[in-house]
Amino acid sequence: MTSLHELEASAGAFSVSRRGTRMPSSPIRKLAPLADAAKARGTKVYHLNIGQPDIETPACMLDRLGQMVSKVIEYSPSTGTPEFLRSMQRYYERRLGLTIPQNQILATTGGSEAILFAFMACADEGDEVIVVEPFYANYEAFATMAGLKVVPVTSRGRDGFHMPPRHVWEQKLTSKTRCVIICNPGNPTGTVFRREELQMVAGFCRDHNLFLISDEVYREFVYDGQKATSVLELDDVDQFAIMVDSLSKRYSACGIRLGAFVTRNSEIYNVALRMAQGRLSPPGIAQFMAVGAESLGDEYTRGVVEEYQRRRDVMYEGLTSIPGVFLRKPEGAFYCMAKLPVESAEDFAIYLLSEFEDRGETVMVAPGEGFYSSPLGRDEIRIAYVLKEPDLRRSVELLRLALERYRSR
């Protein structure tokens, strides 16, 4: 009779799931060990690789923590606390002019959970989601978790990464297509899609019975007097539109991990609600902290936008002055995709952290290849201009020197 030990031995090594092996590395974080090693050597690293704002979290949010008197930190309702949902209603009314009932808003653990809920509510394992590339790299990770295949519609830097025409979208349609996801304003490109572009993609979804997921976590950050259009502002989208929101960037509070899933489709809402019940509750302390932030109003937003616009201008003018570097001026968010005069931007990013330094300083960037599903972006990097202006100017100078040395090796 074969023993349990013999059966285990004959089975060979344990293996992880196929889903696990397909999970992509983050282009934003995968070079972190090299950055840590550079710091251990005493090198200062300017982080342009990640969208972590250095603008202070509003005092009203920090002050709220001191007002918490609960002696037990309880589960919050799966939907989110009534106080937080009311605060989001007030925000949407003021910011977008939209009246959204509480039973159309779910509090989520960051915008990330909202995207994951949307993918799993709209599609089954093996189905496809169309995305405009380059795209936020974690879309690929969320799709992998949900068992979906990402199908890219490619935008081009020479066009400012705006949407390609509808016939290109039609070419990507298959019997397995279930939804489309867009990011507006865009991460990693800084593109702000025009209303007519959104109407085009909404018409595409309507005609083919596809859900449209709109990631709008950067909606405040639009420059040169422009304004972003929310998918919920479009006509005749109620049955297929899902809006993803987050407080992380709006209030420079990434660590509270608080977002929202918003839809007028009651069936999709109820499916997402059951998922929310399955994970029990979104972070209660974060929701308590967030209530009242919506009252900061336009003056707060205007000041933050003006600061990021100045930073954008510093970064854009600096980068375009470097020979061989190409990018269009970003219209929103706080990112840009820059084309470098190198064959492999990832190799250059590794060089920045492992070999290059000037006066004890270097820069960390995110290789562009990880923001594409197609074999593109090898000579591009994503930059997050979230540092103060003097640090951005120094970062540009370091990139200039590094490119000169890297290309002359």
Image (cartoon, rainbow, N blue to C red):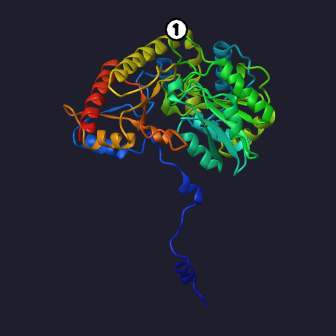
Q: Which residue is mark 1?
A: 299
Name the residue nearer the viewer: 217 or 408: 408
Residue beneath the point at 27% across and 42% down? 38
Residue beneath the point at 52% across and 75% down? 12
User: Is the C terminus in the top left, top right, bottom left or bottom right quadrant?
Assistant: top left
As drawn, 223 above or below 130: above
Location of residue 114 in the rendering, given as x and y in whole percent from the top left corner: 64, 36
Horizontal side of residue 53 vs 161, given as left or right: left
As drawn, 101 above or below 300: below
Image quadrant where residue 373 sits: top right
- Residue type at numbered disc 1: Glu
User: Is the N terminus in the top left, top right, bottom left or bottom right quadrant?
Assistant: bottom right
Name the residue nearer the viewer: 74 or 288: 288
> Circle 1: is it few (<14), some (14-19), or many (20+) Cα within 10 Å?
few
Residue placed furthest toward the bottom: 1
Location of residue 92 in the rendering, given as x and y in whole percent from the top left corner: 66, 18
Location of residue 241 in the rendering, given as x and y in whole percent from the top left corner: 73, 29
Horizontal side of residue 139 vs 398, given as left or right: right
Residue 377 in view (yes/no): yes
Location of residue 263 in the rendering, given as x and y in whole percent from the top left corner: 73, 29
Image quadrant where residue 69 sits: top right
Residue beneath the point at 61% across and 22% down? 193
As drawn, 295 above or below 251: above
Residue 240 in view (yes/no): no
Residue beneath the point at 54% across and 51% down? 23
Provide the secondary structure element on which disc 1 rests.
Answer: helix
